[in-house]
Image (tube, rainbow, N blue to C red):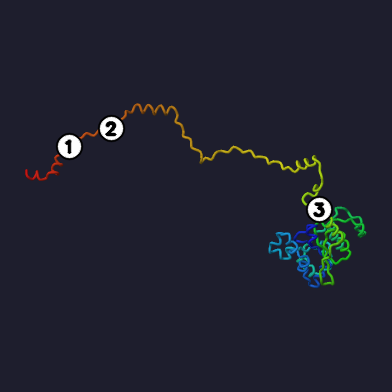
Amino acid sequence: MLVYKNTFKFRLPYQIICDEHIIEETYTKRYNLLNNLNKILQPNIIHASSGSKHESDDMSLNPKKTLKLFVTQCSMQHIYESKNEHLIDFVKYNFERRRCNHDYKNPKTSEDCIFSITNVTGKKDENEDAKDINNMVVGTNKHKYIICTQDINLRRKLRRVPGVPIIHFMNSNVLLLEPISDTTKRFSEEYEAQKLTKGLNDSKNAGLKRSLEQLIESSTANEIPAPLKKKKSAHNPNPLSVKKKVPKAPVHHKIDDEKDEIKEPSKKKRKRVRSKKKSENSAEEKDKIENPDSTDDA
């Protein structure tokens, strides 16, 4: 899975598409498909080397967080036709439905349905009905699906599509992840060789000599335009920090106040004048206090 992770950018959670045949086998044998797929793919161990956020979280140890099981509409329609209610309830509880945009009234076989959603070409394959493997249009695994199937013809077709992991039962009890196919190996080798020749950061221009005009054009294209400065709008001052204006008195009030001041004469302070009698009496009292004997002799 390291090749699929580094070359084809597989990310957690893995999306695993199962056909109706492998679902029936797991149900009849009471085989724990999710836990065994987790042991085979080892998503936590593989992605731990890159320091992904999923591995730092303890919840990622739960296989329900790292793996998602899907069943297509056509495969689900074949399960409905079996009229096994327990099997239908088992699929509803453990699998998510994946839309394949095929008519459910006339469902395709699991081989054609799964191959159509895995081999994404953007073109109509003329040899699809004839099932000519050598002349078919090869696309890419756009949605990063992992296919779990027992169909031999489907596995032969998917080996010609780069970047498709295939899982199947071996000896009816052991799940097996197939080794990388020749097309996938060839694609990964070309991808790694391009890193050396074209560079890691700039795959278009690294390692190539360019003229001055091309350098100037690339520099001008990479220039970031300066951000526009916002014009500051005029705001009113803070009313708490502004000194209040003192209202000016009108002119006619000033004239009236001046006339009143002229009419009212200034009052002079009166000086305190002491009487002579009080001064004489106070002198006698002092003599009595100082010479009490002289008064007794008299």
Instruction: Give the amino acid at mark 1.
Output: Ser
- State left or right for residue 36 relative to residue 252: right
Q: Nearer the viewer, residue 60 or 247?
A: 60
Quadrant where the N terminus sits is: bottom right
Percent across and percent down for residue 193 are 83, 54
Instruction: Work out whether mark 2 precedes mark 1 in sequence or the reverse, and give the earlier one.
Output: 2
Instruction: Give the amino acid at mark 3.
Output: Leu
Q: Secondary structure at mark 1?
A: helix
Instruction: Give the amino acid at mark 2.
Output: Lys
How far is disc 3 from disc 2 in space, using C-alphas?
Answer: 112 Å
The quadrant in which residue 57 appears is bottom right
Q: Is residue 3 above or below residue 197?
A: below
Does residue 39 appear anywhere in the picture? yes
Labelled disc at residue 162: none
Mark nearest the camera among 3 and 2 is 3
How far is disc 2 from disc 1 in space, using C-alphas?
Answer: 23 Å
Q: Which residue is mark 1?
A: 279
The quadrant in which residue 184 appears is bottom right
Q: Is residue 107 above or below residue 259?
A: below
The quadrant in which residue 13 appears is bottom right
Percent across and percent down for residue 77 are 83, 64
Q: Which residue is mark 3?
A: 196
Mark 2 nearby-residue class (10 Å; few <14, some 14–19, many ≥20): few
Asked whether the beta carbons under mark 2 and mark 1 sit within 8 Å of each other, the answer is no
